[in-house]
Image (cartoon, rainbow, N blue to C red):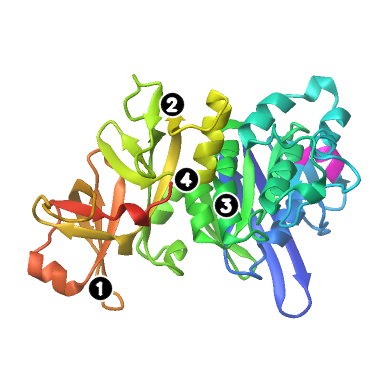
């Protein structure tokens, strides 16, 4: 399944959208770039909210626009839209808002249903509230649910976390991640925040000055030293694994002193229990809040390279709890008195460490060398 867009749109004297690109549409595709680069304008063209006269938009074999000759309006494209600010109707209850589009979707087109969407987004205990009784994160979850319940062919998210404070973002991120993984609906997400892209996207379309410069998988984007995703907070890695029980024979996974396990059969890390999401998941799995997480779920762990140190020997008598054996794959040239050392974990995932050029020389670091990556548990959030 692909989406092809060819569009040129000029605004004033200082901006022109000029795109001719085909995007694969399995999973989550992020449109990433600085504010003003044209991400939202491109999203509006895809949705049919902007209508450049000489544009082509084709989705999965359907022609949504072909120049001046053909134009399919938004309501016939079966697209779910979620913006920065929620668009819930204040005179309706939370449940009535959630079911607004579902009730208007022909039964033959319904692929997603209320029970599964409510469980996916953790909103089944909020249904009877008025909209003004919901927090910002809860409102945005209802907006996502309402968009999903029209059983869209495509879901467009325009910076869905931008209007939320930091704490609320951390609360809604696990639900957004779960929705992306479980809904089966292809998603195009606009963002200028690397953290959001690294936690949610499967591929990234990098935009600059109205143009798509390149489209690559998230792994490819994180593997190159000059990735635009590194411009703000520096280099970062994204590890994939299970959050909760690494022993699949266990039904319950103890959360010890606020920490739980993340990893694979060949790699394990202690990470802070994401309090809100973990408690919510436990409450819905067992009927009450517990000190355990039930089962394990696929997850991603974002690790900033500056939070990773390297040791030649097995560390002893040290407060850092996570010691991963890794093999150095490459050592990048120094930039701004910092060197990125790219390593592979035992399960062949890429882990980046930021050290000084002096440390590289002092430890005689070299490709193919076996070392230990030291990662503070408090620096991690799955």
| Front label number (3 vs 4) | 4
* Numbered mark located on residue 353 in the image: none
Which of the pair 129/163 is nearer the observer?
Answer: 129
Mark found first going from the N terminus, 3 or 4: 3
Q: Secondary structure at mark 4?
A: loop
Judging by the rendered image, the residue that carries numbered circle 2 is 295
Which of the pair 37/358 is nearer the observer?
Answer: 358
The residue depicted at 24 percent of the width and 44 percent of the height is: 345
Mark found first going from the N terminus, 2 or 4: 4
Separation of marks 3 and 4 at Cα, in angstroms: 24 Å
How many numbered marks does the figure carry? 4
Q: Is residue 35 left or right of residue 275?
A: right
Judging by the rendered image, the residue that carries numbered circle 1 is 334
* Numbered mark located on residue 30 in the image: 3
Separation of marks 2 and 4 at Cα, in angstroms: 15 Å
- Residue 90 percent location from the top left of the image: 87, 49
Residue 26 visible in the current orientation: no
Separation of marks 1 and 4 at Cα, in angstroms: 35 Å
Q: Residues within 10 Å of mark 3 (few under 14, many from 20)?
A: many
Judging by the rendered image, the residue that carries numbered circle 4 is 274
Separation of marks 1 and 2 at Cα, in angstroms: 43 Å
The residue depicted at 75 percent of the width and 46 percent of the height is: 81
The residue depicted at 53 percent of the width and 54 percent of the height is: 196
Quick check: is 319 in the magenta stretch? Answer: no
Determine whether label 2 and label 4 are within 8 Å by CB.
no
Determine whether label 1 and label 4 are within 8 Å by CB.
no
| Front label number (1 vs 4) | 4
Residue lying furthest right: 91
């Amino acid at each position: 399944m692909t989406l092809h867009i060819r569009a040129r749109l000029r605004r004033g004297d200082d901006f022109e959208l000029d795109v001719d690109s085909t995007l694969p549409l399995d999973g989550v595709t992020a449109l990433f770039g600085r504010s003003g680069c044209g991400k939202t304008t491109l999203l509006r063209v895809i949705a049919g909210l902007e209508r450049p006269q000489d544009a082509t938009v084709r989705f999965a074999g359907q022609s949504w626009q072909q120049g001046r000759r053909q134009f399919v309006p938004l309501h016939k494209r079966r697209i779910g839209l979620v913006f920065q600010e929620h668009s819930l109707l204040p005179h309706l209850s939370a449940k009535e808002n959630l079911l607004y589009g579902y009730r208007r979707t022909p039964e033959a087109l319904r692929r997603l249903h209320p029970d599964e969407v409510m469980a996916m987004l953790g909103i089944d205990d909020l249904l009877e509230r008025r909209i003004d009784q919901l927090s910002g994160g809860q409102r945005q979850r209802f907006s996502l649910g309402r968009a999903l319940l029209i059983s869209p062919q495509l879901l467009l998210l325009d910076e869905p976390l931008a209007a939320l404070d930091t704490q609320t973002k951390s609360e809604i991120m696990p639900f957004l991640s779960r929705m992306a993984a479980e809904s089966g609906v292809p998603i195009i997400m606009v963002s200028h925040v690397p953290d959001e892209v690294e936690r949610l996207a499967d591929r990234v379309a990098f935009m600059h000055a109205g143009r798509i410069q390149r489209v690559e998988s998230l792994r490819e984007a994180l593997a190159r030293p000059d990735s635009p995703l590194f411009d703000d907070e520096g280099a970062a890695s994204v590890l994939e694994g299970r959050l909760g029980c690494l022993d699949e024979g266990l039904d319950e996974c103890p959360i010890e002193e606020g920490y739980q396990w993340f990893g694979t059969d060949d790699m394990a890390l202690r990470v802070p229990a994401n309090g809100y999401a973990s408690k919510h998941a436990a409450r819905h799995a067992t009927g009450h809040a517990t000190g355990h997480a039930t089962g394990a779920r696929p997850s991603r762990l974002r690790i900033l390279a500056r939070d990773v140190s390297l040791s030649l020997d097995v560390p002893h008598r040290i407060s850092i709890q996570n010691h991963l054996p890794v093999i150095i794959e490459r050592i990048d040239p120094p930039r701004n008195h910092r060197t990125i050392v790219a390593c592979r974990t035992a399960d062949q995932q890429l882990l980046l460490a930021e050290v000084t050029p002096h440390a590289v020389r002092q430890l005689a670091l070299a490709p193919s060398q076996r070392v230990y990556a030291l990662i503070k548990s408090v620096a991690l959030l799955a």
